[in-house]
Image: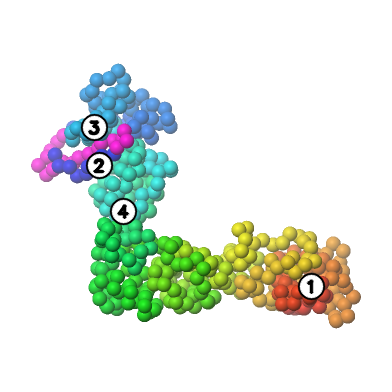
């Protein structure tokens, strides 16, 4: 008999061999898989249980396939399991547990390899998946994985998924560099990880006609020193092809970049270290040649440039007609207020006696919003007041500051409310002496309404 697949799982688990017939053995033989259905519902292969309860009929069927001494089927089953992982176990003993489960119709269960087991990742071969399942150190997961024939990466991926794991790998991906932890420019130490990674990258560079030389590390130094965007992007692409990942040690936390568009930030990035450059360009972009500001910020943070959350401002509140619930606008304002709590509208009835009380509104303009008449289009500033008070917009206004504040607070349209308060906040930020001055409120209302 030829062996297609051998896998030993330890920790009182399984010693299993998936066996198949060679060309000289294709002849009639006894049923081996699905011959009975007594175990079709079990979800615990080691204990022969369904939802924690021993399945007696399954145990009887399993017992029919065993030839060991024991008082009960489950006692015999335990002996067979122990024998399959013994150091001196032969091929028959290793294969018996799986063969018995298959004979009695055991099925793959979507809970066998799921939580709390870690998702299998960074593998792209059958041998790699086998080793990863072994490392999970869970007998039920091992049995489930082997219940169907695993012949290559694709069938291994399918089997893991059927058993409830959430595999995080692509069979076509090379993962040679996934363990280099940001050492994109330093692959000279003679370690197994670096040797495999360097071989992959050297092959990538050798095939790249735009980059001179066949040695990746030499190309890295030359390309990053020349600050050529296209070539740096190519290096990042080669690293991704070889399975490298972004690492949060790549960029300094406090680096400063100037720009409010993705392209401007990308250009400014060329002034940073080569390691930082390639790490950021390894991020997720809809179009790496035309990245968005937010895509660049996300990638910078992933690579360790946490300070750019505030120092780089994406104008995500621009062109939104003061939509106060826009996700990206709120994200920008939250970053700019430098607070762990998400930005939110100040509470109704908040006192505006100090410039600090208006400060939260200022983040709208910091993030690109511009006061415009459309924000309060057709708003009368009287309709929604509990006690309507007409506002005098002339230089000799007969109103009080409190009346202006009450009229603005009564506006239920959040966009209009935000526009006016932001305009007031900007005036006060420019001249704190203006707080409590009626012309400030008049100018803000005029800026945000017809």
Q: Which mark is residue 123?
A: 4
Q: Which residue is mark 3?
A: 86
Q: How many marks?
A: 4
Residue 41 location (% of width, % of height): 37, 33
Disc 1 to disc 4, C-alpha distance: 63 Å
Q: Earlier in the sequence, mark 3 or mark 4?
A: 3
Disc 2 to disc 4, C-alpha distance: 16 Å
Q: Secondary structure at mark 3?
A: loop
Residue 114 location (% of width, % of height): 41, 43
Write the residue at 37% across / 27% down: 55
Asked whether 438 falls inside the magenta stretch, the response is no
Mark 3 is surrounded, within 10 Å at the Cα level, by few (under 14), some (14 to 19) or many (20 or more) other residues, namely some
Above or below residue 417? Residue 30 is above
Write the residue at 48% across / 70% down: 296
Numbered disc in front, either 3 or 2: 3
Q: Which mark is residue 7?
A: 2
Asked if the residue under mark 4 is in contact with the one under mark 2, i.e. CB atoms within 8 Å, the reply is: no
Q: Earlier in the sequence, mark 2 or mark 4?
A: 2
Above or below residue 54? Residue 191 is below
């Amino acid at each position: 008999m030829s062996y297609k697949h051998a896998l030993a799982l330890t920790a009182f688990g399984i010693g299993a061999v998936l066996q198949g017939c060679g060309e000289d053995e294709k002849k009639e033989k006894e049923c081996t898989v699905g011959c009975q259905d007594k175990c079709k519902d079990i979800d615990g292969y080691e204990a022969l249980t369904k939802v924690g309860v021993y399945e007696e009929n399954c145990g009887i069927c399993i017992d029919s396939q065993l030839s060991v001494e024991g008082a009960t089927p489950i006692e015999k089953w335990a002996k067979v399991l122990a024998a399959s992982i013994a150091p001196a176990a032969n091929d028959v003993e290793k294969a018996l547990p799986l063969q018995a489960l298959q004979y009695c119709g055991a099925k793959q269960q979507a809970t066998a390899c799921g939580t709390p087991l870690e998702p299998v990742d960074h593998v792209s071969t059958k041998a790699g998946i086998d080793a990863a399942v072994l490392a999970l150190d869970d007998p039920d997961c091992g049995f489930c994985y082997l219940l169907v024939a695993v012949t290559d990466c694709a069938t291994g991926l399918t089997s893991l998924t059927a058993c409830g794991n959430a595999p995080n790998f692509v069979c076509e991906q090379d993962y040679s560099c996934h363990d280099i932890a940001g050492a994109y420019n330093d692959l000279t130490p003679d370690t197994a990880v670096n040797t495999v990674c360097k071989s992959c990258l050297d092959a990538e560079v050798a095939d790249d006609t735009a980059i001179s030389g066949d040695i990746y590390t030499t190309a890295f130094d030359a390309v990053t020193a020349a600050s050529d965007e296209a070539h740096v992007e190519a290096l990042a692409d080669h690293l991704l092809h070889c399975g490298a990942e972004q690492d949060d040690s790549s960029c300094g936390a406090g680096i400063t970049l100037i720009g409010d568009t993705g392209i401007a930030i990308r250009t400014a990035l060329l002034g940073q270290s080569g390691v930082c450059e390639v790490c950021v360009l390894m991020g997720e972009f809809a179009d790496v040649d035309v990245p968005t500001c937010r895509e660049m910020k996300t990638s910078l943070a992933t690579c360790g440039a946490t300070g750019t959350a505030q120092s780089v401002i994406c104008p995500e509140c621009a062109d939104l007609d003061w939509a106060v619930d826009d996700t990206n606008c709120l994200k920008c304002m939250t970053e700019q207020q430098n607070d762990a709590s998400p930005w939110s509208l100040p509470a109704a009835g908040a006192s505006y006696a100090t410039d600090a009380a208006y400060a939260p509104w200022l983040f709208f303009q910091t993030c690109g919003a511009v006061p415009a008449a459309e924000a309060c289009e057709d708003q009368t500033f009287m309709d929604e007041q509990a006690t309507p008070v007409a506002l005098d917009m002339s230089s000799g206004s007969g109103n009080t500051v409190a009346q202006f504040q009450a009229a603005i607070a009564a506006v239920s349209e959040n966009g209009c409310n935000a526009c006016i308060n932001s305009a007031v906040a900007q005036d006060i930020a420019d001249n704190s002496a203006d707080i409590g001055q009626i012309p400030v409120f008049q100018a803000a209302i005029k800026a945000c309404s017809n």
